[in-house]
Image: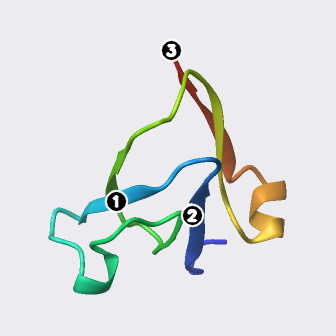
Amino acid sequence: MGSMVHPFHIHGVQFQVLSRDGAEPPQNEQGWKDTIAVYPGETVRLAVTFPEKGVFMYHCHILEHEDNGMMGQVSVQ
């Protein structure tokens, strides 16, 4: 998992990439997304508007990574 690119996804929402490692995202990432590539060691800031209160799952779309813990939940109150 260490050197692979991770397709990151949040269920039920779209989001915008605000920055990658503090820099403005490339032109092709300045629209709404539901999955983005995240590189090893990279910090990506996102803007997300959740449509309602509840629990939303996020994960890497590589099944083996998901099975090894690259998934979680966001609780929106």
Q: How is the image coloured?
A: rainbow
- The residue labelled by disc 2 is 8
User: Is the C-beta separation of discs 2 and 1 under 8 Å?
Assistant: no
Q: Is residue 49 left or right of residue 57?
A: left
- Give x and y (percent) for residue 63: 82, 67
Q: Amino acid at mark 3?
A: Gln
Rendered residue at 50%/14% (across/down): 77
CA gap, disc 1 and disc 3: 21 Å
- Give x and y (percent) for residue 53: 56, 21
Camera-side mark, 2 or 1 = 1
Q: How many neighbours does mark 3 have within 10 angstroms: few (below 14), some (14-19), or many (20 or more)?
A: few
Vertical side of 39 occupied by 66: above or below? above
Camera-side mark, 3 or 2 = 3
- The answer to which image quadrant residue 28 occupies is bottom left
Vertical side of 26 occupied by 46: above or below? above
CA gap, disc 2 and disc 1: 13 Å
First in sequence: mark 3 or mark 2? 2
65 or 32, which lies in front? 32
Q: Amino acid at mark 1?
A: Gln
Q: Looking at the rendered structure, which numbered label has been put on residue 60?
A: none
CA gap, disc 3 and disc 2: 23 Å
52 or 1, which lies in front? 52
Rendered residue at 53%/63% (across/down): 34
- The residue labelled by disc 1 is 16
Q: Looking at the rendered structure, which numbered label has been put on residue 77?
A: 3
Q: Amino acid at mark 2?
A: Phe
First in sequence: mark 1 or mark 3? 1
Vertical side of 56 occupied by 40: above or below? below
Q: How many neighbours does mark 1 have within 10 angstroms: few (below 14), some (14-19), or many (20 or more)?
A: some
Rendered residue at 15%/71% (across/down): 24
